[in-house]
Amino acid sequence: MVLRSIPQPLFKYLPLERAKQVLTERTIRFSQPKYLNDPYEMQLVINPVSLRDDIVAREIASGTPVNEAEETASRRLESVAFDLVDMIKKTRNEVGVLSLSERSDGLLMWAHYAQDHRGVAIGLQLEQCLLPSNQDPNSLVWLDDVKYLSEKIDFIREGTAPWKSLLRKSEEWRYEEEWRIIRSLNTLRPVTSEVYVAELWPEAIKSVILGARMSPAEETAIIALLEASDDFSHIEIFKSVVSSKKLALEIIPFKEWASRAIYSEFHFDENWREIREWVDLEALGELLTSSSKAD
């Protein structure tokens, strides 16, 4: 299925309320390509030259003389091209995509998909609930990493299935470091005529990362949800923290973050979360401690 090792866990970035829904209902949505945010999803090129050559080659392979094969190709070119468009559109409506990322600390990922850093990133192990055994030859279950290219796909020349174009995106999206699970809708459970989900076993959830801008009340709500079920006792909880030293995020265990909170609330202003965006409170605390010891 894939040519290189799969990094695990892979991360699903979600707004806060959507994350709560995933954890409560224990299902996760596979979106049809028409609902994805890239306008080029499954926008394949039907190159007339490649298509004509393909028709000619097929005719010759079936025993048709070259001249007749070329005449047939010219006569059928338009209708075959339009039929292929219909086939691609049909395929686009028959599959669902679960987009995941190798990164847990992507600034843009948190901004674009996790409610401006107020949401959650869920670390997922690829259990059978997400990648079921595919016994039905008419069903598709596939995992692979996305390749980032500048050109559209001439799928006639490449001889590739239309759904495989979902594994190629513009270079603009490279920051996502994306992996995709692609499944036929008939392997998923319909919630509505447009929404399809897969069961998400608790053991498939490896970790939960709370966004850097999540409020204390929101942090408490997510942790209470996880602690309410023994099924989630194995899940590691982390906090995304805006680094004081560079323009980046740090992913730290939530217990470490809680210890920092207790210390900061005791030693600094009650608005320490806001203050730490400008002041390295950890370094300040160390300097103050050193000074007091020296005195």
Image: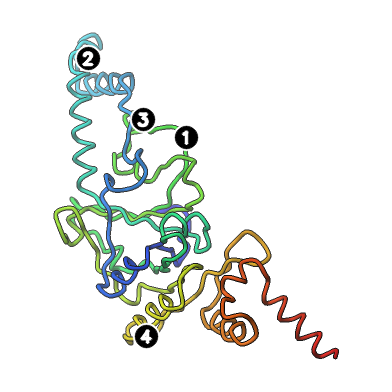
Disc 1: CA contacts within 10 A as few (<14), some (14-19) or many (>=20): few
Circle 1: element type? loop
- Tell which circle, 4 or 1, labels the residue nearer the N-terminal end: 1
Disc 2: which residue: 69
Q: In the figure, residue 288 lies in which quadrant? A: bottom right
The residue that mark 1 highlights is 150
Q: Which residue is mark 3?
A: 154
- Which of the pair 285/180 is nearer the observer? 285
Check the image and report above or below for 259 versus 157. Answer: below
Q: Amino acid at mark 1?
A: Ser
The mark lying in front, picked from 4 and 2, is 4
* Three-letter amino acid code at the position of disc 3: Asp
Q: Dot 3 surroundings within 10 Å: few (below 14), some, or many (20 or more)?
A: some
Per the image, label 4 sits on a secondary structure element best described as helix
Vertically, is 188 above or below 204? above
How far apart marks 4 and 2 lie (CA) works out to 69 Å
Q: Say what amino acid the circle numbered 4 marks.
A: Glu
